[in-house]
Image (cartoon, rainbow, N blue to C red):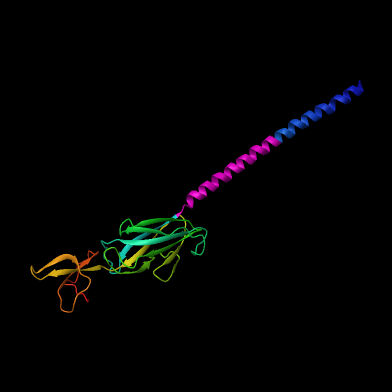
Amino acid sequence: MFGSSAFVRPKRFRFGFFVLALALVVGFIIDQSDIASSQSRKRSEKEQLLANGTVTVKLGNQFGVTPTDTVTIKKQLFTGSTTCASGGGNITEVTGVNPGAGHVISLSAADSVMIQPSTSTDSNGFVQGIQIPDGNPATFLPDNKVCIQGFNDANHNAIVSSTAGVQTFAFDTGSNTCTTTPKFLFNAGEKVCVRVVGSNGNAGQPWKLNV
């Protein structure tokens, strides 16, 4: 009888130990699942907070007058480089960049973008370069190129500085009027018509123009 009783107790003990171990394992799995879920949620929240920044390229005027012109730019995104040194994508041409909405470029903190405006505006105005009024890190290069370092969760402007365009047209001596025929070459003393375009400026009239 004593031997039978001693034989049963270990079975009960082993069963109880198994139940306890199983409860601990299940509790550990649930706990790890909660931790993973919490970490995933925190990463998601962090990614939302650190959304890509944007660079807005606009056309500006060196005299502070809002131009009515537009300009063409070239842009190239560099993935994984903040100095436009590697990971360069295709060079894209963007036309009709204006002073209002401009052209918006999405950029993360790990990347960079190279911007190069054309040498003249679409109305023949002179392009002087690019200004970064918000102070974002940028490297100015020859040929009016600028490399803008990426950033997160903000917008910075890149202003293409320009002057008003000058267009010349033929003058009709018979009717004593200006024509709409472009005039690219003319002799000394010959009458031509000159039109300033791409600017709303009207101060200091009459304007003086050296040709």
Quarter of the picture containing the N terminus is: top right
Q: Position of residue 205 (x, y in %)?
A: 17, 71
Residue in the picture at 70% in, 36% down: 25
Q: Is residue 38 above or below residue 133?
A: above
Q: Position of residue 189 (x, y in %)?
A: 15, 79
Q: Does the magenta stretch mainly form a helix, a strand or a loop? A: helix
Q: Is residue 153 above or below residue 200?
A: above
Which residue is the extreme one toward the left? 175
Q: Position of residue 22 (x, y in %)?
A: 72, 33
Q: Is residue 23 left or right of residue 153?
A: right
**Quarter occupied by residue 21:** top right
Q: Is residue 193 left or right of residue 91?
A: left
The answer to whether residue 33 is magenta is: yes
Q: Is residue 60 above or below residue 47?
A: below
Quarter of the picture containing the C terminus is: bottom left
**Quarter occupied by residue 62:** bottom left
Residue in the picture at 84% in, 28% down: 10
Which residue is the extreme one toward the top? 1
Specify start and end residues of the magenta stretch as a single range.
25-52
